[in-house]
Image: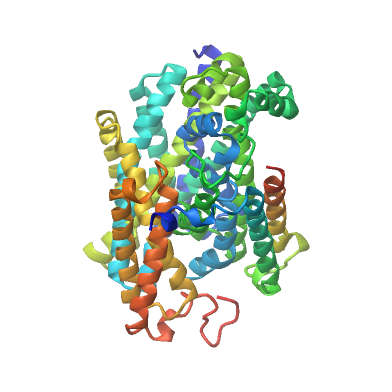
Amino acid sequence: MLNNIDYFIVIAYLIGLLFLGLYFRKFVHSSTDFFLGGRMLPFWAIGMSIVVSDIGALDFVGVAGQAYRHGIAVGNFDWIGSVPAMLLAAFVFVPCFWKSKLYTIPEYLGRRYNESVRMIASLTWIIFFAFNLGVIFWSSAVLLEELMGWNEWVSIIATAIVVGLYTFCGGLTAVVMTDVVQMIIMFVGGGAVVCLGFYKVGGWSGLVEKVSAMGSSYENHFNLILPVDTQTPFPWTGILFGLTCVMSMAYMIGNQAIVQRCFSAKNEWHAKASMIFGAFLKMMIPVLVLFPGLIAIVIHPQLEDGDDALPTLIRTLLPPGLRGLLFAAFLAGLMSSIDSVLNSTATLWTKDIYEKFIRKGAPDEHYLIVGRVATVAILVLGVITSPVSDLFPGIYVAIQTFLSIFQGPIFSVLLLGIFWKGTTQWGGLAGLVGGMVSSGLMYLFKGSLFTIEDPFLYVSWWSFVTGFIIAVVVSLFTQSHPVSRLYGLVYKLNQPQTEGIV
Amino acid sequence: MKTILNFDWLRWLSIDAAKNVFLVLFIVIGILVWLLPKDYIYEGLENPRWWHNLKLWATGVLAMIFITYVLF
């Protein structure tokens, strides 16, 4: 499918990215440089990195497929499923975290509650990231093989070498700065498909007119708000309660891979601005990943599987050169996801587990080496375990379910921890564990509890509510930390002599 | 139990009313952003300029999402 010019673009892109990433190794002299970019990064780079880390190669195909089947309602995940959460993060959580000079979100939970909460949160993220890495590798490689004809192992090894080298050498600075380039490539590659697609279908008005004329099954394809009894996984109640109030909040505020970038900002203003700039960029993402699915409805209305929408569009729409650019955009999505997972998992392991429980008080150079070794170990584990996804097709769903079990409860204790100084360490622990157990039970009995087939939005909401109630009730009956220990960890609770809101 | 978990108790709300719930949410967030103290917005900057005002940035993003949900 690719010709010489496409190969040239892809190879030049990989080599250029490798050299760019390696350039940043000269800025890494300490563990803070490696894990947090020396706390010197500007808002625009962090904002771009947050957005691009959130979009994998699979999202291009998956979201276009969902749009082909269900219409623009899937855009809720990038619009209302990001913007309110990113604004709350920008103005409340991120400034508090940044001032506390944190490395990890579990570290905040450890300071606010106790070490058990920190340990549970950290291990859960490490397990999720470690298993997810192999799945990202394999599923993306299979996709690239289908789209471009590259052997799976060529994609995996090439990506692992490039990403591994620059993440190992340059740490978070290399990750963030290469993400900036990855985002530009994704916007250019994805934008090319959308522009050519719109040209083909007669612009936006032509698209709406043609899709609307295709019958009653397409009548909701341009509606963001779908009724409670919709057959799609996106009823408005699930979008409002599960996605907006819980899942997006937990993702933008409690996900180490996202928030760690904000810790690296050069000052508090840059930390806040990075999230708001990221929210602005997020508003554009559905244009790139969702609109190709709608365009494919007009150009290829007879597809049996919606996930074929984008690959078919690429084959029929893109000329040589642009295919290479789009392939580079897919690789950008893959690499930006992998470098985030590598750096965040290495940070969680080194700061929350190794430094806390295995070797305390070692010189800073030691933790820098541990971080680098962890980066390599996680990468090798990801590559080796990637074919497991092929042996167990359900593993992708299982890993995403594992994350959604955790999302609601972790957000409930984060929210209470930052807004209510009366939340006790035992309230936090009970809320986290109780919420996780409740979501596990809801998944176990989902057939008898829920009417829609995939109720992950509802499970997130109800497990959040359960964790929240348990944490409040237990806190009312247990002793809280002295106020002096909570300075800087609770919103508007400052040391008496300091000024500012947090 | 099933009625509560599946939000069947909100079935009576029309789609237009549901859309208004989303729009009101954006307006409330905008109001909360504008209620933040001015000093807090500029914290970390030595020489703040008008374009450093993050309330304006947030309002711009909220305007974009508000229009998107009005249109669709």
Return the x and y of residue A282 as percentages of the image width and height: 60, 46
- In this view, the residue farthest toward the right is B50
**Colour setting:** rainbow
A377 is higher (above) or lower (below) than A356:
above
User: How many numbered callouts?
Assistant: 0
Q: Is residue B58 visible?
A: yes
Residue B62 coordinates in the image, percent (x, y): 68, 55
A13 lies above or below A129: above
Q: Is residue A464 left or right of residue A203?
A: left
State the image coordinates of residue A424 (x, y, percent, origin top left).
36, 78
Who's the residue at 34% across and 39% down the image?
A397
Q: Is residue A108 visible?
A: no
The residue depicted at 49 percent of the width and 50 percent of the height is: A238
Quadrant in the picture for the C terminus of chain A: bottom right
Q: Nearer the viewer, residue A459 or B66?
A: A459
Q: Is residue A228 left or right of residue A133?
A: right
Residue at screen point 37% across, 65% down? A467
